[in-house]
């Protein structure tokens, strides 16, 4: 329990630290809110005083002067409201932006293994949904807490001075009021959690259904998908009904208690007037304070819910921020300089966190500067895994990976990856123009360099046939590129980057022979003079490679040239004849 409270304090402290850069805005918000609260508290008192003191003496000028001042105070209050609403929300928005910036930067640092374990949809909801509740709390939280406390205290003292007996009646009823609120709020909280869970269900259905739309259509299963969605939608509707039922119960209960309280005040106040212990003006003033007193109590009970929701969101944020990247630079990590491109995979064993079996078991491979090594083998054999160890996307479980004789764990990740060009099987295009997508390889490249890279990657002609040439929008909301075109965009990026080490993963999807030949020649052009590891799925394309290794699920099963491996009659020869018979 103590640990829990300590952690809670830690969260609050961290939360408070996000106010720090915006303290001026925070102060402005608080001061304005305090002024509003003072105007609200003074209005009935000043009216009472002017009616009880100025009117009987017929000091009309002074009376109207006070009324004019009150009107002035309300005009001022309107202005203050504007500031509190606009600048106060702006404070929340700025804090949200800061929190989102930190979260996004942290997510950029997290390693491949983190993204293996976490679903995209869930992560996205953390960066968007959760943070909204945090903003609401950031803005309304301190304001509600501070202003409500001041108002309750102020109204309490004033009511006591106006008529202490009547005040005691009101205070006697308040605990019932708070108890009712606390009980129904709990129910409302549960109902609201239920609504959120059901909404997450809907989101999950939408995400999976949209991602799998093509499969659903291919199997003509749209109706089943709709049925699944409708079920989730019905559950959401049911949960919302429950929520509104509780809310209606709470609000009508509040109205009831307010009615009872007013009746009590009037009845007892009437009695006190009859007994000559109070006048009508006092009773009216008092009635006004009852409302002033009750409103912040209602607000505070709503604040509890807002606080819990906001803090729940903030805790999830802190949790995510607390995930340490698996791969981090050592404190004394050095940059990789004057790269020759010598790669040594030295007795490496590797196992993914999610699996007990190693994918690579005591693998040793030496790729000399400028040499091209083709990696082949059955699907799932570990070819991509091996290649991901060189840029240190994962750390080896045993052994070491050396680049130019230096362990990759002793190098700065950024510097290591700056010297490695990777063409992946499934190339990702960012939303934007094809020009920007190629320039992603080297953001400071000139237009001429981008065009030259496109030519060398054999994608130039394709781009010229697109509606807006290099300015054509690609990615999610733009022109769809074929697998072969995407690979050539990726090759163009690497031409710009011009790294000494290359890792090329051929597309597995069937390409037509013209595209295949173009990619092949672009690959060859790219590989010239660079240390290259090429994962080949079509063995015919690597016949000429000087060095071929076969990876079969435990490690390197065979190694040699095409001719040597064919003569050996092992796994390579079997895969080769299998592919040949398929392609014939
Ligand atoms: P290949 O490139 O030869 O087809 P991979 O290196 O992609 O083979 O995969 C080797 C094995 O590791 C497979 O059994 C695959 O299921 C597993 N694997 C690949 N990536 C991951 C991952 N991110 N997490 C867990 N297991 C993985």
Image (cartoon, rainbow, N blue to C red):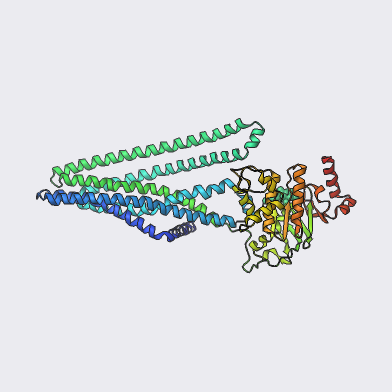
The residue under the point 30% across, 46% down is: 294
The residue under the point 14% across, 52% down is: 62
Nearer to me, 285 or 175 = 285
Nearer to me, 173 or 132 = 132
| Picture coordinates of residue 92, whole percent (x, y) | 43, 53
| Picture coordinates of residue 57, whole percent (x, y) | 9, 50
- Image quadrant in which the C terminus is located: top right
271 lies above or below 314:
above
Nearer to me, 271 or 536 = 536
> From where the camera sits, is residue 352 visible?
no
| Picture coordinates of residue 397, whole percent (x, y) | 71, 59
310 lies above or below 206:
below
**Side (left or right) of 247 relative to 583:** left
**Side (left or right) of 411 relative to 56:** right
Q: Find residue 417 and report its image quarter.
A: bottom right
The residue under the point 38% across, 37% down is: 248
> From where the camera sits, is residue 446 visible?
yes
Q: Find residue 513 and report its image quarter.
A: top right
**Side (left or right) of 388 relative to 181:** right
Q: In the current view of this chain or complex, which residue is farthest to the left?
A: 57
């Amino acid at each position: 329990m103590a640990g829990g409270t300590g952690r809670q304090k830690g969260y609050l402290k961290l939360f408070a630290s996000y106010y720090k850069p915006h303290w001026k805005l925070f102060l402005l918000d608080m001061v304005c809110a305090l002024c509003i609260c003072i105007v609200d508290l003074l209005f009935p008192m000043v009216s009472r005083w002017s009616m009880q003191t100025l009117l009987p003496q017929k000091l009309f000028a002074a009376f109207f002067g006070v009324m004019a001042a009150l009107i002035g105070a309300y005009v001022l209050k309107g202005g203050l409201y504007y500031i509190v609403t606009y600048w106060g929300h702006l404070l929340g928005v700025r804090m949200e932006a800061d929190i989102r910036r930190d979260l996004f930067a942290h997510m950029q640092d997290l390693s491949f293994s983190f993204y293996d374990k976490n679903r995209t949809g869930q992560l996205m909801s953390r960066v968007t949904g959760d943070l909204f509740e945090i903003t609401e709390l950031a803005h309304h939280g301190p304001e509600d807490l501070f202003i409500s406390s001041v108002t309750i205290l102020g109204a309490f003292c004033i009511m006591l001075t106006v008529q202490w007996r009547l005040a005691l009646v009101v205070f006697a009823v308040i605990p019932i009021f708070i108890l009712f609120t606390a009980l129904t709020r709990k129910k409302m909280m549960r109902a609201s959690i239920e609504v959120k869970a059901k909404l997450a269900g809907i989101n999950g259905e939408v995400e999976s259904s949209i991602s799998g739309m093509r499969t659903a259509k291919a199997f003509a299963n749209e109706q089943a998908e709709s049925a699944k969605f409708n079920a989730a939608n019905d559950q959401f509707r049911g949960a919302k009904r429950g929520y509104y039922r509780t809310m209606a119960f709470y609000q009508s209960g509040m109205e009831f208690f307010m009615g009872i309280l007013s009746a009590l005040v009037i009845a007892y106040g009437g009695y006190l007037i009859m007994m000559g212990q109070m006048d009508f003006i006092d009773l009216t003033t008092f009635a006004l304070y009852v409302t002033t007193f009750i409103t912040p109590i209602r607000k505070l009970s709503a604040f509890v819910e807002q606080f819990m929701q906001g803090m729940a969101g903030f805790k999830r944020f802190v949790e995510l921020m607390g995930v340490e990247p698996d791969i981090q630079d050592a404190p004394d990590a050095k940059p990789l300089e004057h790269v020759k491109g010598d790669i040594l995979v030295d007795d490496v064993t590797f196992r993914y966190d999610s699996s007990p079996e190693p994918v690579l078991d005591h693998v040793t491979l030496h790729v000399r500067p400028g040499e091209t090594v083709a990696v082949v083998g059955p699907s799932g054999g570990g070819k991509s895994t091996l290649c991901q160890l060189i840029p240190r996307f994962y750390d080896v479980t045993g052994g070491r990976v050396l680049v130019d004789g230096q362990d990759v764990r002793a190098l700065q990740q950024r510097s290591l990856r700056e010297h490695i060009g990777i063409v992946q099987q499934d190339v990702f295009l960012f939303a934007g123009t094809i020009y920007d997508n190629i320039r992603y390889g080297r953001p400071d490249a000139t237009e001429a360099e981008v065009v030259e890279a496109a030519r060398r990657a054999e994608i130039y002609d394709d781009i010229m046939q697109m509606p807006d040439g290099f300015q054509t929008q690609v990615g999610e909301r733009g022109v769809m590129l074929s697998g072969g075109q995407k690979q050539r965009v990726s090759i163009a990026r690497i031409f710009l980057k011009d790294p000494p080490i290359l890792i090329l993963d051929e597309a597995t999807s069937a390409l037509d022979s013209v595209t295949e030949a173009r990619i092949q020649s672009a690959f060859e052009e790219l590989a010239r003079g660079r240390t290259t590891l090429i994962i080949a799925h079509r063995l015919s394309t690597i016949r000429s490679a000087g060095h071929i290794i076969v990876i079969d699920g435990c490690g390197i099963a065979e190694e040699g040239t095409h001719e040597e491996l064919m003569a050996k009659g092992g796994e390579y020869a079997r895969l080769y004849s299998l592919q040949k018979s398929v392609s014939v």
